Amino acid sequence: MIRLKRVYEPPGPGDGARYLVERLWPRGVKKEDAALTAWLKEVAPSAALRRWYGHEPGKWPEFQKRYREELKDDAHRAAFAELRQAARKGPITLVYAARDEERNSAAVLQQVLAGAPYVHAAGRVRTNPDAVRRFSGN
């Protein structure tokens, strides 16, 4: 099971391993209060992609596409593999800072880890049947 939780919410007993998946440390949060297993900033969107997106809802479909492409590059691969391995062992929680609980990078990570479809820029749902194979190294 892969859960999502804002870093500003208290950790819970059902969270399992908690991974902060943000490039920047969230404002106002003490590291000890976050109760993290690890901070995987390498799996977060690049600074350029994060700035381009700016959490503008109209850019969400394109952001998903671009971020999924970034996840395949060498800079993201090791951190993504760590998440994938942890998810195989038990429940994990992807911890994020964004206000938008539906359109954020952690939501994309959750979808990719689960092999879920995403909405293409034209509004069509794109299935991703080879997601598990491509991201698992098989």
Image: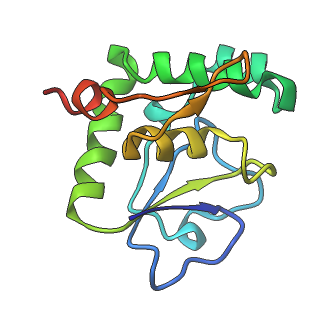
Query: Residue 42: where, in percent of width, then height?
Result: 44, 31
- Residue at 32 percent across and 15 percent down: it is 74
Looking at the image, the residue that sits furthest to the bottom is: 13
Who is closer to the viewer here, 97 or 113? 113
Query: Residue 24: where, in percent of width, then height?
Result: 64, 38
Q: Is residue 62 visible?
A: yes
Q: Is residue 125 left or right of residue 51?
A: left
Q: How many marks?
A: 0
Vertically, is 113 above or below 92?
above
Q: Is residue 126 left or right of residue 1?
A: right
- Residue at 33 percent across and 47 percent down: it is 83
- Residue at 66 percent across and 24 percent down: it is 124
- Residue at 57 percent across and 32 percent down: it is 118
Quadrant assignment for the N terminus = bottom left
Who is closer to the viewer here, 108 or 75? 108
Q: Is residue 56 visible?
A: no
Looking at the image, the residue that sits furthest to the left is: 138
Q: Is residue 118 left or right of residue 101?
A: left
Write down the quadrant of residue 95 in the picture.
Answer: bottom right
Who is closer to the viewer here, 91 or 47? 91
Quadrant assignment for the C terminus = top left
Query: Residue 5: where, in percent of width, then height?
Result: 61, 63
Query: Residue 72: where, in percent of width, then height?
Result: 37, 19
